[in-house]
């Protein structure tokens, strides 16, 4: 199997899916306002519910789709996700009430996970010594889509209104089925037999995997929490200016551009020296680059720190995925990546809520302290877990006891 060809195909698919799904973000609250939700508090509540409903249902369903992948393969999982997400998103153009839109957003979460599944597919077909490079390159596709999608969505909604954008989004997602069906090769599936039967018990018996699930959850909280509050923080720096949307969008885009630059190189570096060595360092560095943003009082200084952090963060997700793949027996890989997806979606759901609570209790700048500390703690946790795995605790204690005994004898 030509894994580089698979990377190129999935890069295009991830770009289209990410661009499509983020087209609706700029006008989601305006669409609700058009439906009659005009009171400020109610509009904020409905926007939060509609935005987060997808993450909740996706977190519930991800392990189930993992079981589906263990039986039928991740290529079939990609086709399943593309059909469900595309059709239901297109149906949002017909929503006439906030409740209908909320239900459809919740339903699309049941079929979502295309991007996470694409990572899982590559992890199955790419040689382990190239997994970081491949996954880092693939990540740039979804990030590029996240950058360009809101720009296209905003322009289309200004020209044609809100409802046609949902149709365009659904069409973009459905079009990704063509390269998946006709160009992407089927990934190998381990036959499920009585002797080789997969279960979630096998997944949670692997302690290194549990550490990586927790790390995935914490990283998403740290990243999504800051992103959800970026417009409010930029406003605190520049005041009520006419180009506030552009300035806050630029703060997010700069991080995405830096991630696109850093991800492939850091993934390749991890392949060369070991992802288990690079991941803790990248997490700690990204946390250290987040902390100075607490005291940033100028928009250009914020851009510099966001760019530096983006360069480092670009290597975190590929390293996590590569390590999860390396720790996963092939017969339960689908279940493992299902739990990984749930961890990620739960982080997406928790991040904005935690950031809002922290900003309300302290200050808007304190969200960067939350993000930085979470990333540093996650790096320490992953590094400690790797150290424990490479040097078993009993052997480590024996070595310390032997050293202490030697010191006592040498003193006497």
Image: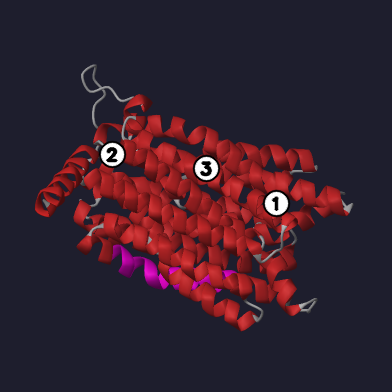
State the image coordinates of residue 201 (x, y, percent, origin top left).
Answer: 35, 25
Q: Is residue 260 magenta?
A: yes
Quarter residue 331 falls in: top left
Q: Is residue 84 above or below residue 238?
A: above
- Name the residue that disc number 1 marks: 357
Drawn side of residue 246 relative to residue 316, left or right: right
Q: Is 325 on the left-hand or right-hand side of 216?
A: left
Horizontal relation, residue 242 to residue 197: left or right = right
Q: Earlier in the sequence, mark 2 or mark 3?
A: 3
Q: Is residue 238 among what the camera can see?
A: yes
First in sequence: mark 2 vs mark 1: 2
Q: Quadrant of residue 317?
A: bottom left
Secondary structure under tag 1 reads helix
Q: Residue at x 69, y 54 (%)?
A: 356
| SS type, badge 3 | loop
Q: Looking at the image, which is closer to me, 253 or 95?
A: 253
Residue located at (72% from left, 43% from top): 101
Q: Does the magenta stretch mainly form a helix, a strand or a loop?
A: helix
Residues under numbered marks 3 and 1 in contact, where contact means CB atoms less than 8 Å apart: no
**Nearer to me, 172 or 316:** 316
Q: Which residue is mark 2?
A: 328
Q: Is residue 218 above or below residue 59?
A: below
Compare residues 75 and 273 and report the one nearer the observer: 273
Check disc 3: other Cα within 10 Å, few if <14, some if 14-19, many if 20+.
Answer: many
How many C-alpha atoms fall within 10 Å of the one at disc 1: few (<14), some, or many (≥20)?
some
The percent position of residue 88, horizontal first and vertical second, equals 61, 41
**Magenta span covers which residues?**
252-268
């Amino acid at each position: 199997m030509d894994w580089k060809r698979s990377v190129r195909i999935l890069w295009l698919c991830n770009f289209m899916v990410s661009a499509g799904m983020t087209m609706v973000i700029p006008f989601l609250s305006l669409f609700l306002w058009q439906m009659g939700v005009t009171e400020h508090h109610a509009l904020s509540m409905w926007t939060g519910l509609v935005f987060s409903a997808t993450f909740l249902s996706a977190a519930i369903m991800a392990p189930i789709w993992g079981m589906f992948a263990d039986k039928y393969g991740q290529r079939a999982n990609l086709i399943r996700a593309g059909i469900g997400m595309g059709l239901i998103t297109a149906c949002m153009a017909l929503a006439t009430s906030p409740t209908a839109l909320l239900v459809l957003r919740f339903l699309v979460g049941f079929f979502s996970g295309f991007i996470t599944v694409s990572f899982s597919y590559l992890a199955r077909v790419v040689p382990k010594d190239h997994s970081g490079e491949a996954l880092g390159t693939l990540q740039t596709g979804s990030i590029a889509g996240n950058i360009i999608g809101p720009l296209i969505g905003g322009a289309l909604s200004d020209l044609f209104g809100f409802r046609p954008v949902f149709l365009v989004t659904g069409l973009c997602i459905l079009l990704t089925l063509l390269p998946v069906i006709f160009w992407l090769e089927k990934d190998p599936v381990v036959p499920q037999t009585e002797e080789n039967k997969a279960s979630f018990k096998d997944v949670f018996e692997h302690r290194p995997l549990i550490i990586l699930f927790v790390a995935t959850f914490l990283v998403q909280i740290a990243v999504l929490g800051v992103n959800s509050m970026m417009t409010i923080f930029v406003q605190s720096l520049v005041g009520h200016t006419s180009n506030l949307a552009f300035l806050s969008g630029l703060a997010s885009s700069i991080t995405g551009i830096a991630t696109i630059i850093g991800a492939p190189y850091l993934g390749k570096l991890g392949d060369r020296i070991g992802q288990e060595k690079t991941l803790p360092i990248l997490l700690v560095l990204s946390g250290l680059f987040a902390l100075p943003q607490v005291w940033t009082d100028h928009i250009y200084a914020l851009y510099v720190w966001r760019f530096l952090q983006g360069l480092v963060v670009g290597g975190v997700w590929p390293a996590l995925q590569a390590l999860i793949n390396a720790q996963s027996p092939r017969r339960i890989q689908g279940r493992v990546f299902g739990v990984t997806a749930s961890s990620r979606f739960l982080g997406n759901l928790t991040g904005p809520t935690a950031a809002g609570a922290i900003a309300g209790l302290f200050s808007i700048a304190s969200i960067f302290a939350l993000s930085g500390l979470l990333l540093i703690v996650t790096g320490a946790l992953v590094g400690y877990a790797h150290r424990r795995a490479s040097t078993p605790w009993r052997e480590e204690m024996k070595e310390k006891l032997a050293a202490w005994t030697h010191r006592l004898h040498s003193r006497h």
